Amino acid sequence: MREKPFFDLTVEKLNCVRDHNYDRLSEICDDDFGILNINTEGGSEVIRDREGWENWFHSLFARLGAMQAKTWSEITNYEAMQRGNMGYSVVDFDQMLVIGEKKMRFAVISTIIWKRDNGHWKESRYH
């Protein structure tokens, strides 16, 4: 998987979420057209602009911190292609969540649209 386009950047992005590293995550992600993500109640959350993106991650990290939750992602399958300044990847991963003695695993499949911006690859859309 490591040899496929965007794999290392995908791992870094997932690790930013694990580490609550908002600053680096915001450098990697433009999310020009928003994101679709899981909310803290297990439902879907549609976020359409940068302000919504920032608010969502700030509140997620604060809530996880308040719960003393640990999270990490384990990639189980990865496919990607890149053409010129655009590309996409499909990432299958297990999202792990540990709160105290309770451990949960959520299977996730996401599609990420990537763009090259000023010589750097960034997430343009996450779904």
Image (cartoon, rainbow, N blue to C red):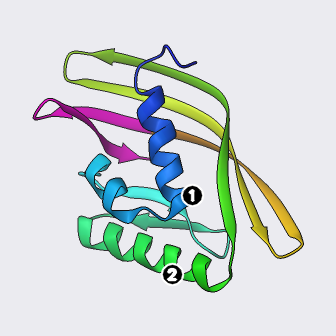
Whether residue 119 is visible to the viewer of this picture, yes or no, is yes
Neighbours of disc 1 within 10 Å: few (<14), some (14-19), many (20+): some
* Image position, residue 55 (x, y; %): 36, 77
Q: Is the Cβ of the residue at disc 1 closer than 8 Å to that at disc 2? A: no
Residue furthest to the bottom: 66
* Image position, residue 106 (x, y; %): 74, 54
Whether residue 127 is visible to the viewer of this picture, yes or no, is no
Looking at the image, which is closer to me, 85 or 23? 23
Looking at the image, which is closer to me, 21 or 126? 21
Picture quadrant of residue 9: top left
Q: Residue at x 34, y 45 (%)?
A: 125
What number is the disc on residue 18? 1
Residues in magenta? 112-127
- Up/down of 13 relative to 50, above or below: above
Q: Secondary structure at mark 1?
A: helix
Residue furthest to the right: 101
* Image position, residue 113 (x, y; %): 35, 36
Neighbours of disc 2 within 10 Å: few (<14), some (14-19), many (20+): few
* Image position, residue 99 (x, y; %): 78, 74
Relative side of 20 to 30, left or right: right
- Up/down of 22 relative to 4, above or below: below
Residue furthest to the left: 118
What number is the disc on residue 4? none
Mark 1 and mark 2: Cα distance apart in space:
13 Å
